[in-house]
């Protein structure tokens, strides 16, 4: 996997984000949006997934968009991510948009490494994922969740459950003592993903637990 880095390579704060080809054109905008409002120096590492549906999915599942299904490559992807998190003196945050947001949530249940999770419009409709969350500990104490206010208005019954599931996930994480917020953005899933992700990272960076 290829990584694209932005910001100060020596910064003590490191933001980790899985991205796809569709994200790369807007990463400079996302970085600039974070830098404009952040009071601390940071490094943003954008790691490109070679196969989006396969590399970011925690387990196999039938497809919901078109014919392509979801693989079970998240564990392999996380092993790649950990190569960028080897300095124990740094503060690491993981985040992402859509399926990358789901991956970030899943990764925080695997390793006690990330100070915060910035899950912007995560694909929390993913079959079995909410049950997985409830059966396993989130090892990060800070979690940001967001969703567009039109995202649950879809004819696909699997994806339409995203609103109910993200509300339930938010309530569950708070019950577990996590610092967690659920923010609603205007629009559908495809509106201003880079700025929604920037907001997610800024919020988790601003928490002190």
Image (spheres, rainbow, N blue to C red):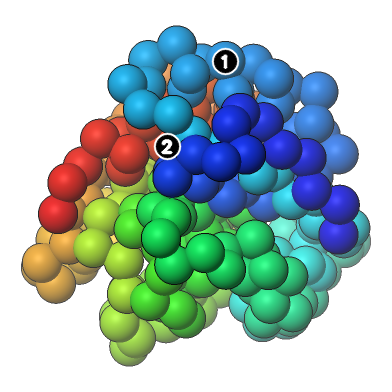
Q: Residue at x 70, y 26 (%)?
A: 27
Q: Residue at x 78, y 40 (%)?
A: 4
The answer to whether residue 113 shows anywhere in this view is: yes
Classed neighbour count for the residue bearing mark 2: other residues with Cα under 10 Å, few (<14), some (14–19), many (≥20)? many
Image vertical order of residue 70 relative to residue 142, above or below: below
Q: Quadrant of the C terminus?
A: bottom left
Residue 200: x and y, percent?
Answer: 40, 36
Residue 106: x and y, percent?
Answer: 50, 71
Q: Residue at x 14, y 72 (%)?
A: 176
Q: Judge from the rendering whether residue 196 lies leftward or rightward of residue 21; answer left or right.
A: left
**Label of residue 4 in the image:** none
**Label of residue 201 in the image:** 2
Judging by the rendered image, the residue that carries numbered circle 1 is 32
Image vertical order of residue 176 relative to residue 36, above or below: below
Residue 25: x and y, percent?
Answer: 81, 23
Image vertical order of residue 108 relative to residue 122, above or below: below
Spatial distance from mark 2 to mark 1, Cα to Cα? 12 Å
The answer to whether residue 151 shows anywhere in this view is: no
Image vertical order of residue 143 relative to residue 60, above or below: above
The residue at the far bottom in this view is 135
Q: Secondary structure at mark 1?
A: helix
Residue 14: x and y, percent?
Answer: 50, 46
Labels 2 and 1: the sequence-earlier one: 1
Q: Secondary structure at mark 2?
A: helix
Number of numbered tags placed on the structure image: 2
Q: Judge from the rendering whether residue 18 lies leftward or rightward of residue 35; answer left or right.
A: right
Q: Quadrant of the N terminus?
A: bottom right
Q: Nearer the viewer, residue 89 or 174?
A: 89
Q: Nearer the viewer, residue 172 or 105?
A: 105
Residue 89: quarter of image: bottom left
Q: Residue at x 36, y 27 (%)?
A: 40
């Amino acid at each position: 996997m290829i990584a694209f880095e932005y910001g100060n390579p020596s910064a003590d704060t490191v933001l980790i984000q899985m991205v796809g080809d569709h994200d790369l054109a807007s990463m400079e905008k996302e970085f600039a949006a974070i830098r404009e409002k952040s009071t601390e120096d940071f490094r943003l590492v954008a790691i490109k997934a070679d196969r989006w549906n396969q590399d970011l999915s925690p387990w196999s599942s039938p497809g919901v968009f078109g014919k392509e299904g979801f693989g079970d490559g998240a564990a392999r992807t996380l092993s790649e991510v950990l190569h960028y998190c080897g300095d124990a003196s740094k503060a690491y945050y993981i985040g992402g948009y859509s399926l990358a947001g789901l991956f970030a949530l899943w990764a925080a249940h695997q390793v006690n490494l990330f100070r915060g999770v910035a899950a912007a419009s995560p694909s929390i409709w993913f079959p079995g994922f909410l049950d997985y969350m409830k059966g396993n500990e989130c090892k990060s104490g800070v979690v940001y969740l967001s969703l567009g206010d039109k995202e649950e208005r879809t004819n696909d019954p699997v994806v339409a459950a995203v609103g109910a599931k993200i509300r339930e996930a938010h309530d569950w994480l708070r019950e577990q003592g996590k610092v967690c917020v659920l923010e609603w953005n205007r629009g559908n899933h495809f509106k201003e993903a880079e700025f929604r992700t920037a907001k997610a990272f800024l919020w988790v960076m601003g928490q002190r637990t």
